[in-house]
Amino acid sequence: MPKCRYIFILLLFVVHHSYAQQNNLWYFGKRAGVKFTNSGAQPVHNSVMDANEGSSTICDAAGNLLFYTNGITVYNRDHQVMLNGTGLAANISTVQAALIVPLPGSTTIYYIFTADALENDFANGYTYSIVDMSRDAGKGEVVSKNIAFSGSGTERLTGVRHADGMGVWIITNDKSSNIFRAWLMGCGGLSSSAVVSTTGQVLNQDGLTNTGMMKVSPDGKLLCQTHFPAFDDGTGGVGFNYFQLFDFDNSTGIISNARIINPPSTRMNVCEFSPNSKLLYISRIYDKKIDQYDVSIPTPAAILASRFTFSTTVSFYGIQLAPDQKIYLATPSRFLGVITNPNMAGAGCGFIKDALDISEDIGGQVYAGLPNFINDLSFDGNNGFTYTILDSCTGRVQFNGFSTIPGALSWDWDFGDGFTDNTQNPIHSFPPANPRYTIKLKIQSPTGCGTLERTKEIIPKGLILNADFDFVAKCDSGYVRFTNTSVFLPDTARIQYIWDFGDTGISSLSNPIHPYSPGNYNVRLTVKTTTGCLDQSVSKPINLSAVDVQAPADQEIDPGASVILPTTGNGTHFTWTPSTGLSSATVSNPVARPTFSTMYVVTAFNDAGCKDMDSVFVKVKYPPGIYVPTGFTPNNDGKNDVFRPIMSELFILQEFSIYNRWGQKIYTTSQFNAGWNGKINGITQDSDVYVWVVNALDTVTGKRVEKKGTFVILR
């Protein structure tokens, strides 16, 4: 949902840390994509996928793209259709069309779980296909396709990590029922039977109750189920509905303790949990609102009483927690919405409607869905590590690993600088000269088949700092406006600015304005942190002196010759007009090779915008009348390589033509100073006698002048 037969409704409403790198690339919508890095979310424009609603993406542990799918077609890392990657059993209109799950204990095998749609009456149920990434030179191949594992289905499909930290529960929902099935995927593949839980409301009131979404909280303890309200509410309008909240036991797969949350006159559609698993966000596409609920409290009445609602002004169909611990929202447009602080109750959650522009000129658009992931790929509060910088100057860092995986565990640290460790809570010192390091931790149980990997990029100094500034000076005002362009990460660091303007003036403002008298000054910006070894400064000269420029004396050259035009004075930037015939119009000493006599004007500027002008006349000495040589030597030695007439500026060339001995015209031009290079159709001609004809207009008398003669090619 939105469904094809109800598509008119859609038209009406027409420093961060990567806890797991496997979902740091999202592909969704109409060729849309986002990459999550420590610098924030950035659009990517290489997707070839069309996904109206559901999709899924997977990367390797290092964050490199493996493949992505809309549940129908699978695209490899090169954005080509994967081998045997067509015809999967999902539907373009399924809300949660696909879910990619790595096989525990394997680095090459991945399962793609798919769900059918209301439009197909859920005929395909739930199926899975298997991808082997060792095939096709590492680009992967679908080696098994559309294996049915649950015949009764809805558009809801989700995955949650098993309590052992390795396995994954695949949760499905029988059609028009209150039956949930949790299928355990372990190192041997998907279990042949499911843990069945019959709980909550039977959703058989309307076909649309089989659409919607299931999401499991990051801690693996809560399950949210939504459904779309019936379009026929008895009056021809859209009815009201509710969402259900359940407890989930990620050790046994049992779903229990159903709670119906039923606010009055409300239409609820899709859901997502906050990173801390305490808050739940429900998007209401027909009402163009989002509800926030505190689901950490036990009773439905208390949960309902905690509701905080904010207007979105558009309908958000897709909702997904991201690696940057923000929740992103999708609507058919060029923008993604975002909830910037989803752990914060109330207005502090920070909703932004048009947060990220993902479009580009050649395509790319958000639509009605975002990728589907296992619950802990965006944020796992149960398994991973934290770190504390003990000494910024020496790069000394305390790491603390944590996990809920039962039993004795092995800890394999890679600090990204060539050093490793196998204790749970190591202390490591990094070379302070290098700013960033990618830390990798592998957690493994002796009784488990797989390894849990967690990755973060850290800055042992505490921040990355690059001090810099720009300035704008106006010659006639005496003021200079400084713009602080210093960059530092994270952006929450405590920074102090100290400006020394070079004339005894100082300032602590970020972007000061300072008055100057004429002269030359050296300006220094010092950026101070709370740790002295990280402080940084930058200096730049400012020239506020009056400008004086002198062009050289007037010049006289032969046709085709050149002359250097050196200037003197104290300008720092130059502009010559006209630029015709100059080697460069922005240097102080261009080479001039004009075709006609030309007056060149040079304007010199300094940093303050002060300027001065001067000029030089370059006279081209053409002989009187029209002169045509009797031969030329086209041997590419830079001398006499082109045959052309030479005429004074009193004549306008109308035609210069060359004929061979048989009277065939082999070259013609009306362009002054152009000529023949001794070739016909690129073929070099032998020594011979040729005839030339010149027709020109005498600008003094207004009469046409014609001249003829012969010449030879000398080889």
Image: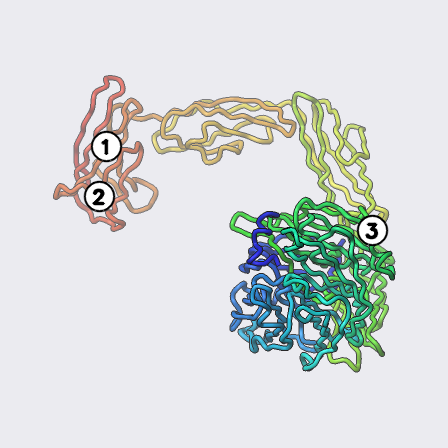
Picture coordinates of residue 159, whole percent (x, y)? 71, 69
Callout 1: 10 Å neighbours few (<14), some, many (20+)? Answer: some
- In the displayed structure, 1 sits above or below 181; it is above
Q: Nearer the viewer, mark 3 or mark 2?
A: 3
> What's the CA distance linking mark 1 and mark 3?
83 Å
Q: Quadrant of residue 631?
A: top left
Q: Quadrant of residue 249?
A: bottom right
Picture coordinates of residue 671, whole percent (x, y)? 30, 33
Q: Which residue is mark 1?
A: 655
- Who comes first in sequence, dot 3 or dot 2? 3
In the visual, does 12 lie left or right of 393?
left
- In the displayed structure, 414 sits above or below 667; it is below
In the visual, does 341 lie left or right of 571?
right
Q: Which residue is mark 3?
A: 345
> Is mark 1 in CB contact (under 8 Å) with mark 2?
no
Q: Nearer the viewer, residue 573 or 239?
A: 239
Q: Label 3 amino acid?
A: Ala
- Quadrant that contains the N terminus: bottom right
Q: Which residue is mark 2?
A: 713
Q: Which structural element holds mark 1? A: strand
Callout 2: 10 Å neighbours few (<14), some, many (20+)? Answer: some
